Image: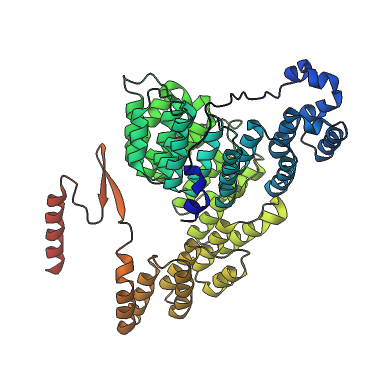
């Protein structure tokens, strides 16, 4: 409701007859050498040749102001772009500096507006996406005509907010400006509709596209994978490589498809894609393909195949993602060999782990019960590798301590974290309380969970703890209180592979062609257990 009121101006009809043509500005030295403005003002060349250092940038900015070039829209648009995308510094510092520069431009051109929208949209969080949309609203009010470069950035911001109505409003502006057939805009809209959960709008737009390039197909496939629609993603890939489509997949396409196969847990599908990739030479072409196979095999239950792909990679091609993928695989399969690989990664091959690698190795320590080693690795993250632990790292430590029965220590970590714990961390600790039958701490954790969300399954775990203690009155009270809420939860799903087919089962849905036969088998098993 907030966005409908705040961005209600987007529904006003645009009073523009035509769009301003926009051409991207190259940053190569050739155009700088031939540009007449740079020939008259040689000091401006520092903007293109050494613009990342802040002190050099300030010197050039001072020259622009003193010489009066700050009135030149071209110069200021370049300064704005470089300050946001090329200058060293964190996002907060660059955004503050960029906003100050933008506010000094008397009449920002379309490039300047697009630069601001693009920067805040690329931050991909709720707050900055709102700022990007706010700049678009101001641009429209000042009668600056959006172009085909504006909308992909703007639609990206709408996707981060996940507001379907807002995406449709932007879509209406696209048609108003006669940009509905622009391929880049269409691809962005396809992704945004999927992110907002509107599959009907997604398929309608995708089917109406007269031209589909590899980005169109890959956008749809990757977004379907992000939404956990793995079977649909594989079906779209089949249509893409069918005879009717002349578009060939690229590396991003194959990474998404292999990821979809792995998330389905289908070993046969993963092996088929592996054979296809080897035959086409994709594995030698890009290490990202091999990394996706390592991950897919691990999720499909074959750590042997996963390790084989990793070992067949040449040492020079293995990057930090390759090591992280195989360590994550061993973490999923009980943590065996993960610590050994982590040590070899650093000492033998000199590959520096990143934040995601530490999540994988801490998870492996949790699953293998190596508490001291896990705490030591967590400590060396900051001291040795200068990586600040985030919420996921703290979650791994809570899980590590909780599985080991050190519930008070785990709860102490939760209380001392620099952030508020999320449902995943609290749920992990609550599950540890259930495993070790600590009802008192479980009640405390439940209260914290209910403050975050009333629709979680946490009360069920606590009721099971009460049941173990024969406190049936408390079990009944929790079950009655949560009955209406739990009915709103999405149904559970599971997949099973039989021969060459992957079967999907959803709680309460009888759409499977053999559902009646399965019910009869289950009834027979129940009768046998009662005998």
Q: Quadrant of residue 477?
A: bottom left
User: From the viewer's perspective, is 106 left or right of 325?
Assistant: right
8 is higher (above) or lower (below) than 322:
below
367 is higher (above) or lower (below) than 45:
below
Residue at the spot x=30%, y=56% of the render? Answer: 491
Q: Quadrant of residue 147?
A: top right
Q: Position of residue 322 (x, y in %)?
A: 54, 39
Q: Position of residue 97 (x, y in %)?
A: 74, 45
User: From the viewer's perspective, is 38 left or right of 321?
Assistant: right
212 is higher (above) or lower (below) than 413:
above
Residue 303 in view (yes/no):
no
Q: Position of residue 78 (x, y in %)?
A: 72, 31
Residue placed furthest toward the top: 34
Q: Quadrant of residue 248?
A: top left
Q: State the quadrant of the C terminus.
A: bottom left
Q: Nearer the viewer, residue 250 or 287?
A: 250
Color style of the picture: rainbow
Residue 290 in view (yes/no):
yes
Residue placed furthest toward the front: 15
Q: How many marks?
A: 0
User: From the viewer's perspective, is 167 left or right of 34?
Assistant: left
Q: Position of residue 413 (x, y in %)?
A: 59, 68
Q: Nearer the viewer, residue 513 or 216?
A: 216
Residue at the spot x=35%, y=28% of the render? Answer: 208
């Amino acid at each position: 409701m907030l966005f409908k009121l705040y961005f209600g101006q987007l529904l006003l009809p645009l009073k523009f007859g035509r769009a301003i043509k926009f051409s991207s500005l190259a940053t190569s030295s050739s155009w700088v050498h031939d540009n007449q403005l740079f020939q008259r003002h040689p000091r401006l060349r520092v903007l293109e040749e050494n613009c990342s250092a802040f002190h050099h940038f300030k010197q050039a900015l001072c020259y622009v102001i003193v010489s009066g070039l700050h009135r030149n829209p071209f110069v200021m648009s370049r300064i704005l772009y470089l300050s946001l995308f090329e200058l060293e510094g964190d996002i907060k510092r660059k955004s503050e500096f960029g906003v100050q520069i933008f506010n000094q431009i008397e009449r920002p051109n379309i490039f300047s507006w697009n630069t601001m929208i693009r920067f805040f949209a690329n931050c991909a969080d709720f707050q900055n996406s709102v700022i990007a949309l706010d700049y678009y609203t101001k641009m429209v009010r000042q009668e600056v005509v959006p172009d085909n470069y504006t909308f992909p950035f703007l639609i990206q911001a709408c996707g981060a907010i996940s507001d379907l109505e807002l995406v449709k409003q932007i879509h209406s502006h696209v048609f108003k400006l006669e940009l509905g057939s622009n391929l880049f805009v269409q691809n962005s809209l396809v992704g945004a509709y999927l992110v907002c959960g509107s599959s009907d709008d997604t398929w309608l737009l995708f089917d109406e596209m007269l031209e589909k390039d590899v980005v169109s197909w890959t956008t749809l496939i990757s977004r379907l994978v992000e939404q956990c629609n793995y079977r649909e993603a594989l079906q779209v890939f089949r249509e893409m490589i069918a005879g009717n489509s002349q578009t060939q997949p690229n590396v991003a396409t194959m990474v998404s498809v292999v990821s979809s196969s792995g998330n389905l847990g289908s070993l046969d599908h993963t092996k088929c894609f592996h054979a296809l990739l080897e035959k086409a030479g994709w594995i030698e072409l890009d290490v990202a393909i091999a990394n996706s196979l390592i991950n897919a095999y691990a999720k499909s239950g074959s750590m042997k195949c996963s390790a084989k792909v990793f070992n067949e990679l040449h040492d020079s091609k293995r990057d930090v993602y390759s090591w992280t993928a195989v360590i994550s695989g061993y973490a999923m399969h009980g943590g065996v060999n993960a610590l050994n690989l982590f040590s070899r990664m650093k000492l033998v091959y000199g590959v520096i782990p990143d934040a995601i690698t530490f999540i994988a190795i801490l998870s492996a320590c949790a699953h293998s019960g190596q508490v001291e080693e896990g705490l030591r690795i967590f400590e060396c993250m900051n001291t040795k590798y200068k990586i600040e632990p985030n919420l996921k790292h703290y979650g791994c430590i809570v899980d590590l301590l909780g599985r080991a029965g050190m519930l008070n220590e785990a709860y102490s970590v939760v209380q001392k974290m620099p952030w508020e714990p999320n449902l995943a961390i609290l749920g992990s600790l609550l599950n540890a309380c259930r495993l070790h039958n600590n009802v008192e701490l479980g009640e405390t954790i439940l209260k914290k969970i209910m403050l975050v969300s009333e629709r979680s399954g946490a009360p069920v775990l606590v009721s099971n703890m009460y049941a173990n203690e024969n406190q049936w009155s408390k079990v009944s009270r929790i079950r009655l209180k949560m009955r209406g809420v739990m009915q709103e939860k999405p149904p559970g799903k599971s997949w099973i592979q039989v021969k060459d087919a992957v079967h999907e089962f959803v709680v309460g849905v009888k759409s499977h062609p053999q559902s009646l036969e399965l019910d009869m088998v289950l009834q027979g098993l129940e009768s046998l257990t009662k005998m």
